[in-house]
Image (spheres, rainbow, N blue to C red):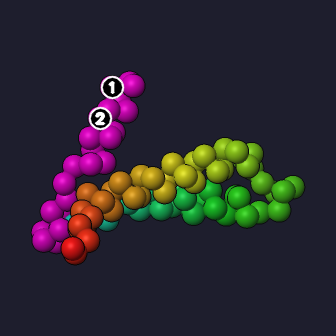
Amino acid sequence: MSRSRVRDRARLRAPVETTDPAALAAYAGELRPVVANLRALAEDATAAPSQRVHARAYLRRELLRGIRELEARIDTAAPATSPAS
């Protein structure tokens, strides 16, 4: 794995201070480009085949990558709680 990928993964998993409004606003600002990219990919994927810009395989791969990134970021902000026994 390349060093940049390692840094990206570490950045994605960095803890988020949810009680600090400024930190939370900065965190939300980092999510906006991810969501904007997912929106553009979804619009392309749902366009008529003759109007589609990217191939279906590319769109699927990039949509899933974006969803995984969102899931990782949400997990850092709201760690999963263990079920009650």
Q: Does 50 sit left or right of 66 as displayed?
A: right
Picture quarter with the C terminus: bottom left
Q: Is residue 10 visible?
A: yes
The residue drawn where x is 33% and y is 57% is: 73
Name the image quarter holding residue 84: bottom left
Q: Residue at x 26, y 71 (%)?
A: 83
Magenta stretch containing residue 55, yes or no? Answer: no
Name the quadrant of the N terminus: top left
Residue 11 magenta-highlighted: yes
Inspect the image, locate mark 1, and give the three-letter code of the amino acid beneath it. Answer: Arg
- In the picture, the disc for residue 51 is none
Pointers 1 and 2 in contact (CB under 8 A)? Answer: yes
How crowded pointer 2 is (Cα within 10 Å; few <14, some 14-19, many 20+) is rated as: few
Q: Nearer the viewer, residue 61 or 20?
A: 61
Residue 30: tell me if it is visible: no
Whole-angstrom CA distance, mark 1 to mark 2, is 6 Å
Residue 49, percent from left and from top: 84, 57
Outermost residue on the bottom side: it is 84
Residue at 58 percent across and 48 percent down: it is 62
Tell me the SS state at disc 2. helix
Instruction: Name the mark on residue 3.
Output: 1
| In this picture, residue 38 sits left or right of residue 55 | left
The amino acid at mark 2 is Arg
- Tell me the tag on residue 7: 2
Residue 25 position (above or below residue 72):
below
Q: Residue at x 66, y 44 (%)?
A: 58
40 or 72: nearer the viewer: 72
Front residue of this view, candidates 51 and 84: 84
Please state the extent of the stretch shown in magenta in the rendering: 1-23
Label 1: few (<14), some (14–19) or many (≥20) C-alpha neighbours in 10 Å: few
x and y percentages locating residue 71 in the rendered image: 39, 58
